[in-house]
């Protein structure tokens, strides 16, 4: 179990991590999601006692990192695949880590086997591909057979096979009852591996909830419409009390009403439709919407930026303002997790 | 965290990178070879020396002449042992495994220092015997007064140079910055400061100027150095202690 309590890190004026409080529990994969520069790596470094927090506290099984005797037996981490001396062989890299924590030499052979590097154990790490380096880093994390594992963007730059391997590894570690904490800047990646989600943006906690809840709250379904008789269609829908959003390029989007009802209404009023299609907003969109305000550098307003891609458009023709879907379907995220 | 575990780990680290072999190997070869060459030249030149210079002719010290160059390889050894951790990113892996930063740094320095001492002492003895063999009739014997002290002192000098470099590298982290400061300093600047009369009084308190006194058996005529061989070594030890403690203080409070 990892517990963060008001964890804060300031680099000069810049607040990289801002008052983070959450708990990472055993038995599940907890995804740590945030755009680049959100403060994920900084948080993880503080967790390992590498960086000193400006304020707040972090505990591993109730203890400070520096209080852990032989810490590799409690928590194994992959921060950066290149955090090793390239001139050292894979075997010696792991051996020196094992010796420092009183881990038997035989365990080095075991983890090399687990990650599939036995054949290159005597080769220097600088000749390794990114994927092999990543595997060696993971071997180091597994060395002490720890109950807690932490991976910082483990699939970055890997080929599909490597990505598949890492996903399965994380799931199997969690199913053994271990605490697995993994960061990513990709929602799609988290959707495939994580059981629980912690989302941060600009160092601040944005969401802390189960993946199931996140999907339920964020799989917004809507109906997309195009019609040459756009103005009349808007009137008709308006009169029927249906909220419509203009989505640009002449398309309209309808929330909370099925395609059948919209189609029937159009038929009743003899309106021509060029498109009537049920749509599902992706989790990726939901994530971008959630972090839109906290993305460090927006693309210039003229270009397509993260904010533009998210479905936050001006309402039109819909009755009460404030019922914009862009607000409606996102508001639940910021609420703290129940049962904490 | 048992210190013996960390010592064993640091020994694995140091023996498993090639820079250890080539830096220490170069330190030994350069020191011995240059000492040999200068011993031959000194013997051939002996007849041209003044009467005073003949009296203070110091065959022991001459056989150590190669150290002025060989120490540069020792500096590279000391710098790389520490700064390799930073330049490769290994430091984060290392400190995650050993969060007690004092245990980490002092174990690393201890292992590297023992290794530097073994190599330094062997180099010093070999330089002495090879040099004396070249000096023929002017040679010193290991049993002569002060000679054994000078030969062991040569090993200590090389060890302290390496250790001082480790401390500086722990403070500066970057290998290029550390080498860029230490190499010209010990090869040029310190020599200039120690030999130009205007700066001599200060210059001779620099680590290498003071430390090399331990290798002298005979004192030059006009020498008014206010410390003896062990006093000089003591000054070098003090410099080394300051560098290592400085390295520790910075490591302790810095983000890794
Ligand atoms: N050592 C540092 N000095 C100054 N700023 C830093 C340092 N480390 C990280 N930052 C800043 O803190 C923010 C968070 O960075 P990081 O934790 O690497 O984010 P992430 O891993 O989520 O991409 C970024 O704006 C980054 O520029
Ligand atoms: Mg990062």
Image (tube, rainbow, N blue to C red):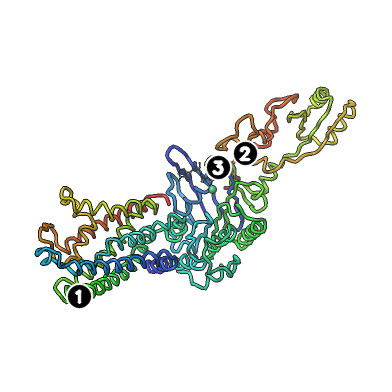
Relative to B136, A25 lies left or right: right
Q: Are marks 3 and 2 on the same chain?
A: yes
- Mark 2 secondary-structure assignment: helix
Q: Is residue A1 visible?
A: no
* Front position in the image: B96 or B210: B210
Q: Crowding at label 1, few (<14), some or many (≥20) Cα neighbours within 10 Å?
A: few
> How far across and down, in percent of the image, does residue A57 sit?
45, 49
- Mark 3 secondary-structure assignment: strand
Relative to A340, A231 lies left or right: right
Chain of the residue under label 1: B
Q: Is residue A143 visible?
A: yes
Q: Crowding at label 3, few (<14), some or many (≥20) Cα neighbours within 10 Å?
A: many
- Marks 3 and 1: which is nearer the front? 1
Q: Which residue is mark 1?
A: B136
> How far across and down, in percent of the image, does residue B206 sit?
22, 54
Q: In the figure, residue B241 lies in which quadrant?
A: bottom left
Chain of the residue under label 2: A
Relative to A189, A82 lies left or right: left
State yes or no: Cβ of the residue under disc 3 lies below 8 Å from any atom of ligand 1.
no
3 and 2 marks in contact (CB < 8 Å): no
Q: Which residue is mark 2?
A: A290
Q: Is residue A285 above or below residue B114?
A: above
Residue depicted at x 74% and y 26%: A318
> How far across and down, in percent of the image, does residue A245 sit?
74, 29
3 and 1 marks in contact (CB < 8 Å): no
Q: Crowding at label 2, few (<14), some or many (≥20) Cα neighbours within 10 Å?
A: many
* Front position in the image: B157 or B168: B157
Q: Which residue is mark 3?
A: A205
State yes or no: Cβ of the residue under disc 2 lies below 8 Å from any atom of ligand 1.
no
> How far across and down, in percent of the image, does residue A39 sit?
52, 44
Relative to A310, B59 lies left or right: left
């Amino acid at each position: 179990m990892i517990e963060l309590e008001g964890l804060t890190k300031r680099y000069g004026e810049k607040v990289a991590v801002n008052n983070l409080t959450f708990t990472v529990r055993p038995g599940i994969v907890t995804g740590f999601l945030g755009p680049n520069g959100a403060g994920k790596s900084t948080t993880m470094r503080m967790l390992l006692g590498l960086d000193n927090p400006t304020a707040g506290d972090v505990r591993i099984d109730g203890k400070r990192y520096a209080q852990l005797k032989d810490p590799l037996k409690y928590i194994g981490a992959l921060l950066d695949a290149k955090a090793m001396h390239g001139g050292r062989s894979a075997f010696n890299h792991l051996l020196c880590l094992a010796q420092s924590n009183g881990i038997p030499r035989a365990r080095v052979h075991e983890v090399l086997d687990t990650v599939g590097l036995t054949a290159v154990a005597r080769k220097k790490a600088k000749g390794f591909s990114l994927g092999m380096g990543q595997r060696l880093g993971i071997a180091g994390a597994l060395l002490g057979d720890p109950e807690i594992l932490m991976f910082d963007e483990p699939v970055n730059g890997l080929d599909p096979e490597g990505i598949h391997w890492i996903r399965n590894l994380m799931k199997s570690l969690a199913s053994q009852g271990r605490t697995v904490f993994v960061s990513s800047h990709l929602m799609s990646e988290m959707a495939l591996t994580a059981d629980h989600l912690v989302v941060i943006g600009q160092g601040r906690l944005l969401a802390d909830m189960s993946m199931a809840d996140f999907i339920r709250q964020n799989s917004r379904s809507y109906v997309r419409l195009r019609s040459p008789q756009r103005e009349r269609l808007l009137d008709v829908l308006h009169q029927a009390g249906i909220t419509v959003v203009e989505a640009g390029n002449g398309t309209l989007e309808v929330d909370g009403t099925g395609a059948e009802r919209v189609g029937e209404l159009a038929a009743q009023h003899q309106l021509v439709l060029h498109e009537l299609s049920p749509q599902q907003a992706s989790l990726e969109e939901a994530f971008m919407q959630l972090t839109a305000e906290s993305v460090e550098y927006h693309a210039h307003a003229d270009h397509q930026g993260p904010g533009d891609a998210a479905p936050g458009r001006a309402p039109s023709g819909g009755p009460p303002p404030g019922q914009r879907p862009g607000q409606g379907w996102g508001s639940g995220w910021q609420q703290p997790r129940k049962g904490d | 965290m048992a210190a013996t575990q960390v010592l064993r780990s640091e020994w694995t680290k140091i023996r498993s990178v090639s820079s250890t072999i080539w830096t220490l190997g170069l330190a030994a070869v350069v020191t011995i070879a240059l000492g040999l060459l200068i011993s031959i030249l000194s013997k051939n030149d002996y007849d041209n020396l003044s009467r005073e210079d003949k009296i203070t002719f110091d065959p022991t010290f001459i056989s150590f002449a190669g150290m002025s160059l060989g120490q540069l390889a020792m500096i590279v050894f000391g710098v790389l042992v520490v700064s390799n951790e930073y330049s490769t990113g290994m430091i984060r892996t290392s400190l995650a495994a050993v969060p007690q930063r004092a245990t980490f740094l002092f174990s690393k320095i201890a292992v590297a220092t023992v290794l530097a001492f073994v190599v330094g002492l062997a180099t010093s003895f070999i330089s002495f015997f090879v040099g004396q063999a070249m000096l023929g009739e002017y040679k010193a014997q290991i049993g002569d007064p002060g000679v054994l002290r000078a030969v062991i002192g040569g090993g200590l000098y090389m060890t302290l140079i390496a250790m001082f470099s480790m401390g500086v590298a722990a403070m500066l982290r970057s290998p290029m910055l550390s080498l860029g400061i230490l190499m010209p300093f010990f090869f040029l600047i310190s020599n200039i400061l120690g030999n130009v009369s205007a700066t001599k009084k200060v210059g001779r308190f620099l680590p290498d100027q003071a430390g090399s006194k331990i290798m002298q058996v005979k004192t030059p005529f006009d020498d008014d150095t206010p410390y003896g061989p062990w006093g000089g070594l003591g000054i070098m030890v003090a410099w080394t202690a300051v560098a290592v403690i400085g390295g520790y203080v910075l490591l302790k409070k810095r983000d890794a």
